[in-house]
Structure formats: structure tokens, C-alpha cells
Amino acid sequence: MIQTTNVMSKLMETVAGPLVPYWDIVRDRVNSSCAGVEPWKIIVCSCGTTLLVLTARDILFSDEDTLTNRTKKEFFRLVKKIPFVKRKIAEEKKKILKDMEHTMNADVDGYITRLPENGLEVEALMEELKKYQSLAKVDWANGTISGTVYGGEPELTKLMEKVYGMFAWTNPLHADIFPDIRKMEAEVVRMCCTMFNGDSQSCGTMTAGGTESILMACLTYRNIARERGIKIPEIIVPVTAHAAFDKAAAYFHLRITHIPIDEKTRRVDINAMRRAINKNTCMLMGSVPQFPHGIIDDIQSISELGLKYNIPVHVDCCLGGFLYPFMEKAGYSVPVADFRVPGVTSISADTHKYAFAPKGSSVVLYRNDDYRRMQFFVQPDWPGGIYATASVGGSRPGAIIAVCWATLMYYGEKSYIESTRKIISTTRYIKAGLKKIPGFHVFGDPLMSVVGFGPAEGFKYNIFTFSDMIAKRGWNLNPLQFPSSIHLCVTLLHTKEGVADKFLQDARECLEELLNSADAEAGGMAAMYGTSQSIPDRSMVAELAGCFVSSLYTTNKSEESNGTVPTN
């Protein structure tokens, strides 16, 4: 020990010895500059300087957002604090919220705001439910809605009703009491692992939807990064990645970097993704397909980056979850983007879309249990006992799991192959038809079920005005931004005879009408999306969107009611 101390002492003398004269000079200058200064001033100046340095560091090197974005946000935040501006914004928000509530209340007679004093008889209750059901004016069953309802087969609906009734009171949180639900959930996950070519080590969990599946994957990689000492991990995603990745960043204290796409192919720019990788990167991802224009990212190249830099790669297949695995067997070539790609470590896939299972069911899959375990939450010290869950939910509806399992078993592989064949062929028929209509531009080369389109080069018109026009013919399409465009998400309902041809005919006629009427009014969606994209302060757009979400919960139509059913 003494020898070690002597060695360290000699080493310090060797290293620090040449610096001693310079240190003496610095010390003398500091002492001379502080001569005659009162001690409290030295303390205040030291603390003030430290505070300024730390503040500057936080401003310049915050790990959660770029300096440019934070500067812009801070500028608009200060502007909105100006009394006149603040008052004007409040007035406009109040007006917008009132307009939105008016829209929500258009067909509503009133709201029940208190429990009925006496419960309703079944017959009366069913009559009330029919009145509520009559509020829905859109007939989704005729195949004029983009996405939303993906199957709707009457026989499957009857099956769902029976299965839900059988398992209505089950809860997978209590696996010892409901081993049937535990078994079904495990089998749903295993069937999905097999579909995505996972080996015996692959695993996963069910979730309440695609958003939760994405959240769980991001949480997993954040937890892994935290164990490696990364304080604020970073996820790198294409700009077209689902907004659930932004939600994960907001929820889990992650930094998110959006990578631009190739304007022609609409696939993520691999070189830009490579340049964005840094020591804090905890996840790369790609979509199969992405929501806006239905394009499949280059998962192979993203995977190679993941392997090279030892970064997990997530594949978001929520939208294409029960199309992609069957495309090859249905006769369509598609890039390999599942567990056959070495660098892919997780996949999210929705069962409540093209698997036709009930809403509120999805899966997140992992290459092995080492990843999955990082998703779990365990509180071993709770007085109520050891609490452990696989995902966000504690208690969960076992009936949804049972109906999902029953749906997969009801269809089977051959029926999914056939539904995939119908949906993909219909999508490509619509894509080819849109390309033949002068004035339309189809974005990229969509291979799956989504076709995104907008104005072709040389044509100047408002695509949202077109969307409003075709909506009057019963079509409900998805509005997109950056660039302004819309898309149709093809479902099994669109494969009915005549639906695709009717859409193409209406699209052609509406566009011709729009191009021939220079004074077409930009109202409805056209006005809303046109305005929102031109607002530089995106937080203002977020506030307006918040007004819409608030309006969904309005009960301001009439005087309070105790919920008693009116008697005539």
C-alpha cells in the first residue's frame, strides 16, 4: 500500500510538476484582482456566473430538442404573453371551441349528466341505445370510408358477440383465476411470432392497440439505454413514422430525431439516418408501410445500420400487420422486413385492422426475451403485494383477447391469404386508375393497402377542396400535410364489386369539376388544413387541435338531466 502511494505521488509530481509555475501565476493574478473586494461580492459573482453558465448549457445543449426548435418555441411563447396577443388568442380559441361544440351537438337533443335515480329496464335501455346509434349518419358498410372499419363481416360480428359474452368478466391480470385467457393470449402472440418468421426464442405481448405496442417498444429501448448509462436516450425515426413515436418521446423523456425522406420514393433517407446516429441513439425504426402514403421503408438498410452500430431496430407493421405476412403466399413480391432480417429486434402489428379482430387488440413482438423483459413493470415493495405487469394496463378486458383469438382461429391462414389477395389487388387497381386521371399524382410506389395522392405537376388546385367535394358523394378520405395530399386506405369493404370503379369515377368527375371552376370555395377541410399548414407557430396548431379534443367531451347542449328516459 505504501509503495503504491509513493508511485502515485511520483506520477503526480511528474505530470503536475511542469504546471506548478503557471498555476502560481494564475493564483497570484486572481488574488490581486480580488484584493479589496468584499467576500459577499465574490460569493454572489461566483454563484451568478455558475448559474449563467448552467443556463447557457441547458439552452445550447438540451438533449430533448434542437436549439433551433427551442428558440422558435421560446419566441412564440413570449409573443403570446403580450397582453393584446394573449387576449386575442383566448378570444379566438373560445370561438373555435364554441363552433366545434356546436358541430358536435348538431344532432344531439341533450346529455345525461347524472345517474338515473332508478336503473332502466332492458327494453327501455335498448330503445335508448338505438337512439344513440341513429346519431351515426355514415354508412361504413358500403365501402366508402378510408380505413376505420377493416372487415365488418356479419357472420364474424355474430361470433364476436357470442365470444365476448362468454368471457365478459375475465381479466388476464388474474392468470390463476382465468387460465383460459392466459392461454389464448400466449397463443395469439405465438401465432404472430410465427407469421413474422420468428424462431422459438421470439416472444411478445398483446396490447390495447398500435399506439401502446409502439410505446412499449420505445420504453424497452429506453430502459436498455438507461442501463448503459445514457441519461436521455434518442430514437431516430423517419419523418413519416407514426405519431405514436412522438408520443413515446413525450411520455418517456426521450429525444426524437425525424429523418427526411427521399421525395421521389417517399422512403427514409438512409444516409441521413446514418449521419444522425450518435452515442445516445437507442433505437432505429422503419415502417411497413408508413401511414401517409403507404410506402415500405428500406428495412434491410436500416437493419444494417443497427448491426453496424449495435442499435436495436424496430419495424412498425401496425397498419400492415396482417397483410405483409401473407403477401408472398398471395402472389405479391414484397421486401423482406421481418425477423428474417438479422438486425430487426422488434415488430409492432395490429390484430384489430387486417386481422379483423375487435378494436383494442395489437401485439408487440421481440426477437428474444432479453428485450421483452425490459418492457415489464415490477414494483416489489408495494404493501399490496408484488405488482408486475407486461404492458401499460393492469386490469385488461379478457373478452377482447378471447375475441381476438377466436377471430384468428375463425379465419385461418388460407382466408387471410385470400383477403390479402383481394385487398392488394384492389389497391393496385385504384393506384393504376388514379395515375390515369390527368391532374393526380400518386406518391411513391405503394405496395400494400394505402394510396396517397395529390396535385400532379403543372396542376394547381386545392386537394382538400377536392376532398370536400368527393365527401359530398359519400367518400371519407384521410387528409395529409407536408405536402398537402390525401389517401385512401383500402379495406375488405372496398373489394366489394363496383366500389373501386365508383371511387375512380367520382374522383375523375370531382377533379374535372374542380379544375373547371376557378372560384371553387375553400371551405371545410380545405380551409382548416390550408390554414394549419401556414401557421409557423406549431404550438398554436396543437392548441387548436386540443380544442377539438376538448369538444369531444362536451355536454353543454342543454340543462342537466338525471338520465331518466323521457316518456311520451
Image (cartoon, rainbow, N blue to C red):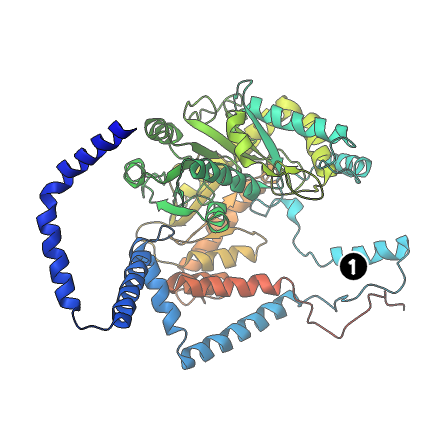
Residue 140 relative to residue 218: left or right: right
Furthest-bottom residue in this view: 84
Does residue 496 appear in the picture of this structure?
Answer: no
Q: Measured along the vertical axis of the image, is residue 469 above or below residue 404?
A: below
- The residue depicted at 44 percent of the width and 24 percent of the height is 333
The x, y position of residue 237, in whole percent, is: 40, 41
Which sits in the foreground, 200 or 193?
A: 200
Give percent across and percent down for residue 139. 66, 50
Q: How many numbered markers are drawn?
A: 1
Residue at numbered disc 1: 131
At 41% from the left and 68% from the top, the residue drawn is 519
Nearest to the observer: residue 123 or residue 442: 123
Q: Quadrant of residue 279?
A: top left
- Whether residue 553 is visible to the viewer of this picture, yes or no, is yes
Pointer 1 local density, CA inside 10 Å: few below 14, some 14–19, many at least 20: few
Going 64% across and 48% down the picture, which residue do you hit?
Answer: 140
The C terminus: image quadrant? bottom right
Query: Judging from the image, what secondary structure is the residue with disc 1 in?
Result: helix
Could you tell me residue 14's position as x and y percent? Answer: 13, 36
What's the residue at 55%, 44% (across, down)?
211
* Depth check, front residue: 384 or 232: 384
Quadrant in the picture for the N terminus = top left
382 on left or right of 197 = right
Residue 522 in percent (x, y) is at 45, 65
For this orientation, the residue located farthest to the front is 2
Residue nearer the viewer, 185 or 373: 373
Q: Quadrant of residue 186?
A: top right
Q: Amino acid at mark 1?
A: Lys
Q: Which residue sits furthest top? A: 200
